[in-house]
Image: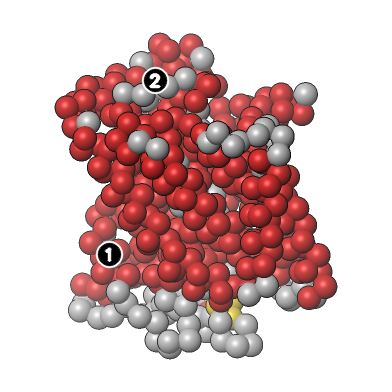
Amino acid sequence: MIGQILDKIDSVMYYPILIIVMALAGIYFTVLTKGVQIRLFPESIRLLKEPPADKKNVSSLQAMLVSTASRVGTGNIVGVSTAICLGGPGACFWMWIMCIIGASSAFVESTLAQIFKKKNSDGECYGGPAYYIERALHAPILAAIFCVFLIATYAVGFNLLCSYNLQSTFEAYSFYNAKTTPIIVGSILAVLTGYCLLGGGKRIVKLTSLIVPVMGVAYVLISLVVILRNITSIPSMFGMIFKDAFDFKAIFGGMAGSCLIYGVKRGLYSNEAGVGSAPNASASAKVSHPAKQGLVQTLSVYIDTLLLCTATALMCLSSGVERNEAVSGAPYVQKAISTVFGVAGPTFITVAMVLFAFTTLLGNLYYVDNALIFLNHKKQPSQLFMRCFHIGCSVVVLLGAVIPMNAAWAAADITMGGMTLINLPSCMLLGKIAIDTLKDYEKQKKEGKNPVFVAENIGLNKDELDFWK
């Protein structure tokens, strides 16, 4: 019954509400920035190499990797598989569309987070949507509500789903027992997560910056091998994707379960563009101009969807494995990869899922710490509170391994949708600030300068800012 209620809320939230808000915001930002996510793509790559002024500070690359660690996760494997099996192959196309227009939203939210970020006594930066909602929109209550949704999303919703997705990969093995295996897997993951949380934010940055590139490259290479082995089926595969994506009679005949809605849902869950999560990591970077971090964050969206999600989709569809509700999730991907690698294929997916799940859990809780500080009057909560909270987070990870699939997905969708419905309209109201910041950046670049941000240059009062004074 709880699962059915969550499903109904989920359906209404995404259609028509969220799909309209996301599309309007993405198109709005794309037009006003003149397609910044495409036009300045080469500049985004160049900025990755730029070191921070002080080696003790977090670089653009490190901040991007933290947000990528949260974006790149089990959704890249299980989320894409579920979208294809339940919505149809056309879901891939709508993921791509939402990724490209959503990257402009990622630029705006991360740029705003940089502008309104704060500095602690150690000189480190922090911030996020709660801070620009409070400072620029003068809406402290709305900022607090956003933080509540963020905690519900990243400490509960996403971690429930992450744990469920991981344990589901073990269904492919003969030793899997529906009663005991989820509990064992959930317990191990909960203990490992709780242990790593004792290291705090800096350990998270270091750990994810080592693991994310390795796991991402390995997964793409393996997917590429499967795709190349089935190269003759690629033309028909793309034909199938586009035919299904533009079958509007089928889409509007069953909108809630269509490839369009599944593409939007799973695309948003995977790349999180506009959700308001990545800005929390973006604010920690030490850069000379806010637009730099905004540009870098667009790459994170591309890496997640155009690279990793596409690798999963093309690998599965090119393999010829039958897709249906029974195999949705990890089994579909495992069957696809086994067509080339045999019994080693499902094992690789399990290892990838373990790495993806682990980095996702750590990246998620990095964001949660930031929200807790905001709600605690901008102060770090007591050690006792944090220990109790982290124990609670570990229990959530354990519970996620044993709950039903539809409840796990619906919980994650609803909490994430709540964040997005606060963050994206806020970004639209504050969009002019981010766009003026971009214009200032491009103006300085044309003059041959390394852009440096001065608040007065875009009409902001420096007294309203903390870091950029």
Give the residue displayed 28% in from the left and 80% down from the top: 450
Identify the coloring: secondary structure
Label 1: few (<14), some or many (≥20) within 10 Å? some
Residue 274 visible, this angle = no
Residue 139 figure quarter: bottom right
Give the residue displayed 56% in from the left and 76% down from the top: 202
Give the residue displayed 33% in from the left and 56% down from the top: 217
Residue 64 figure quarter: bottom left
- Where residue 201 sits: x, y (%)? 59, 73
Q: Which three-letter amino acid code belongs to the residue tagged 1?
A: Ile
- Where residue 66 sits: x, y (%)? 49, 64
Residue 102 higher or lower than 226, as above or below: below
In this figure, which residue is indicated by the disc labeled 2?
322
Q: What number is the disc on residue 379?
A: none
- Where residue 104 sits: x, y (%)? 39, 51
Label 2: few (<14), some or many (≥20) within 10 Å? few
Q: Which three-letter amino acid code belongs to the residue tagged 2?
A: Glu
In this figure, which residue is indicated by the disc labeled 1?
45
Reading the chain from its start, which is encountered first: label 1 or label 2? 1
Residue 257 visible, this angle = yes
Between residue 302 and residue 326, name the one nearer to us: 326
